[in-house]
Amino acid sequence: MRAIWKGAVSFGLVSVPVKLYAATESKDISFRQVHAKDGGRIKYQRVCSIDGEEVPYSDIAKGYETEDGEMVILDDADFAELPATSSREISVEKFVPSEQIDPMLFEKSYYLEPEKTGAKPYALLRQALVEADRMALVTVSLRNRMSLAVLRVREDVIVLQTMMWPDEVRKPELSTGDVEDAKPAEVKMAQMLVETLAGDFEPDEYEDDYREAVEALVKAKIEGGEVKAAPVAKKSSGEVVDLLAALQRSVEAAKSARGEEPEEAATPAKKTAAKKTAQKTAQKAAAKKSADSPSRKSATSVKKSTRKTAKKAS
């Protein structure tokens, strides 16, 4: 594993240098949105909802939407004024009974490994937590934001589990029924069912059947040759809207709706050919005009006179 954070656990005058490792990983099957015809990946653009233009990353800011639907735009200077910290200290606030921490508050889990110089105080802290059956309630700065967390022991390793803030857990304002509405026999039967299915949790008994089925399905398709080699994606800024062509189509649609015959649209190739024809016509006209000019006629007369003089001399 690769350490993602380094710091120290601090309680009282004791400091334990530690490394932080991600304790969990998602193994859920992930899919990509592709074109069913050729397997090409579907791309998404950052398009402004107001002007419809694609927005570069440099022009993207963070906005907070109010309850009235108004947008408050925040820039880097605004965030620089917020209470953020980059402390490398896991500060123990207090040691609390394990049963007082509701598991619903837990978010992400990390393993703590001691540096060589902190091996002994690490072991002492671990032993103290186990014997007291308590968790260490701590504050830690991760990604420049202060978080609430706990330290607990799992398989001789101290685990740090970040927590949600208490006001982030919703109150279950739901209708859940009243046990007084149940008959005594029904209550007894429910208790018997619980006793019948009672047992210990064995993690190895449970597997992700859906993930295994998907992996087997994909493997079978690969072995069966059902694989599409998607061509190299062409760089594109998205759909290019030709305004002139769009207007032309709109005019044709309007004429068609009125029963008029639509005019033939001039394609780029036709436009080029027409341009070349116009240039040739202009060149011929210029040449003819030059031939008919007085200076040209004078030069022609001189040439004819020279030929006649040469014949008489001979």
Image: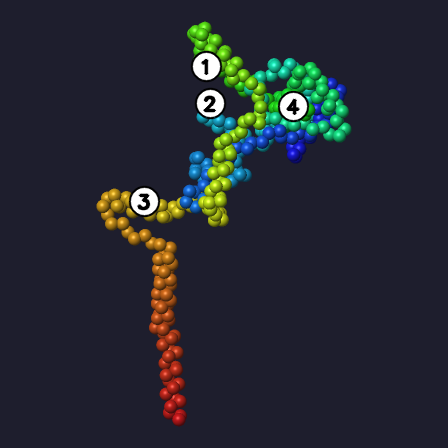
Q: Is mark 4 in CB contact (under 8 Å) with mark 3?
A: no
Q: Which residue is mark 1?
A: 174
Which numbered dot is residue 67? 2
Distance between the Cα atoms at labels 1 and 4? 35 Å
What residue do we see at 67% from left, 19% from top? Answer: 136
Q: CA distance from mark 2 to mark 4?
A: 44 Å
**Which of the two labelled residues, at mark 1 and mark 4, occupies the earlier sequence position?**
4
What kind of element bears circle 1? loop
Residue 177 in view? yes
Please tell me whether mark 3 sits on a helix, a strand or a loop.
helix
Q: Earlier in the sequence, mark 2 or mark 1?
A: 2
Which mark identifies residue 154? 4
The Cα–Cα distance between marks 2 and 1, rounded to whole angstroms, is: 25 Å
Q: Residue furthest bottom?
A: 314
Q: Which residue is disc 3 drawn over?
A: 250
Contact flag, marks 3 and 2 (Cβ < 8 Å): no
Q: Are marks 1 and 4 in contact (CB under 8 Å)?
A: no
What is the distance, in whole Å, between disc 1 and disc 3 at their CAs?
Answer: 55 Å
The residue lying toward the viewer, choosing from 67 and 280, is 67
Mark 4 or mark 3, whichever is nearer to me: 4
User: Is residue 236 visible in the rendered structure shown here?
Assistant: no
Instruction: Tell me residue 212's x, y (percent).
Output: 51, 34
What residue type is disc 1 on? Answer: Leu
Residue at 65% over, 32% down: 4
Q: Position of residue 24 (x, y in %)?
A: 60, 29
User: Between residues 309 and 226, which one lies in front from this camera angle?
Assistant: 226
For badge 3, the amino acid type reads Ser
Colour scheme shown: rainbow
Q: CA distance from mark 4 to mark 3?
A: 69 Å
* Among numbered discs 3 and 2, the one appearing first in the sequence: 2
Q: Position of residue 105 (x, y in %)?
A: 57, 20
